[in-house]
Image (cartoon, rainbow, N blue to C red):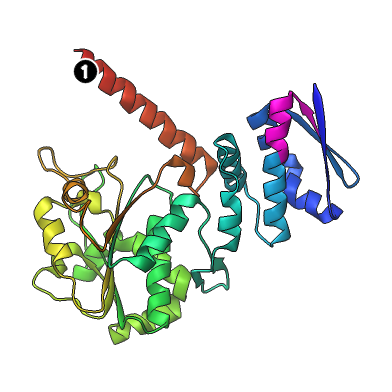
Amino acid sequence: MKERQITLENTSQAFSLFGSFDANINILEEAFSVTVTQHGNVIKINGSDGNTKKCERAITQLLNMISRGETVTEQTIDYVVSLVNTDNESFVKTIIDSNCVCISAKGVPIKPKTQGQKKYLDAINANTITIGVGPAGTGKTYLAVAAAVTAYRNKDVSRIILTRPAVEAGEKLGFLPGDLQQKIDPYLRPLYDALFDMLGSESFAKCQERGDIEVAPLAYMRGRTLDDSFIILDEAQNTTGEQMKMFLTRLGNRSKIIVNGDITQIDLPDGKKSGLKEALAVLKNVEDIAIVRFNESDVVRHRLVQRIIKAYEKHGEKKQRNENKN
């Protein structure tokens, strides 16, 4: 058995590190098979030599985040653990030092929380078209909207256009009452939610009235040239090849396009090939187009989402192996 010690700058750090009812430390103890205790300003880690060293590295990074005003959550700890296990914990400093993308309507600074998110935002800044591909909960839509709002506030663009295909997620909803806007709103709700969070409902309503913000189904993009705009296509895995080509060729002068999707959640009818899958193959070597791939370690929703995604990936791999044998 090996014991390692870390001296805290003050006891308030311990509260942020340990969390409510020691929830944060329990995650570290489980992840590294160690025991962590606090004695005044000293944290003691007991376990095997290799595991205590890893836990010490993880706690050091978490304390660095706390000292810089970052909030430590269960998802944060899971991510730091994954970085330590792959000897990449130095990236924590990159996250801490990342510039704020946007300030939400509630005054909360929005910053990348993972390596994938940082790469994604860097790609958006450096390229005219960025394609983000990855599982649910990785912040693709949220960060894209944050980047769009920042570009709009800085007057880099004069309007924001958000769109997604109106495809039902595996269930038939039947006839929807109301006018056209009311019929399509349920499909666009995730985009509205992100905009409300960034701008506030009142500011959003004013921007929409002026025509500075447009939220519309993908079919409405046909025949248009979108100049001076920040354009986001969400749920792009549910486009057909024809729809994807139509959308990408709407690009006008002084505009940016972001395409987001998860190729493991395609809701197209059987026999229809995803336009996002095709675009990944066709556009992979085109200049000024970036493709960023997220994985389960980039998930920033509830920590259980990571486990769900990993479980489905393992199930899919097993199913594929069985099919190959047959």
Residue topped by disc 1: 324
Whether residue 130 is situated above or below residue 107 in the rendered picture: above
Question: Which amino acid, by three-letter code, is at mark 1?
Answer: Asn
Q: Quadrant of the C terminus?
A: top left
Query: What residue is rendered at 80% in x and 25% in y?
Result: 2
Left or right of residue 86: residue 286: left
**Number of numbered markers:** 1
Q: Quadrant of the N terminus?
A: top right
Query: What is the residue that sits farthest to the top in this orientation?
Result: 326
Magenta residues, dominant SS class: helix
Query: What residue is rendered at 31% in x and 27% in y?
Result: 316
Whether residue 241 is situated above or below residue 304 in the rendered picture: below
Q: x and y percent of residue 282 in the render? A: 16, 50
Left or right of residue 163: residue 27: right
Q: Which residues are magenta?
A: 44-56
For mark 1, give the secondary structure.
Answer: helix
Whether residue 139 is situated above or below residue 226 in the rendered picture: above
Is residue 19 in view? no
Q: Is residue 50 magenta?
A: yes
User: Quadrant of the rendered structure where residue 154 is?
Assistant: bottom left
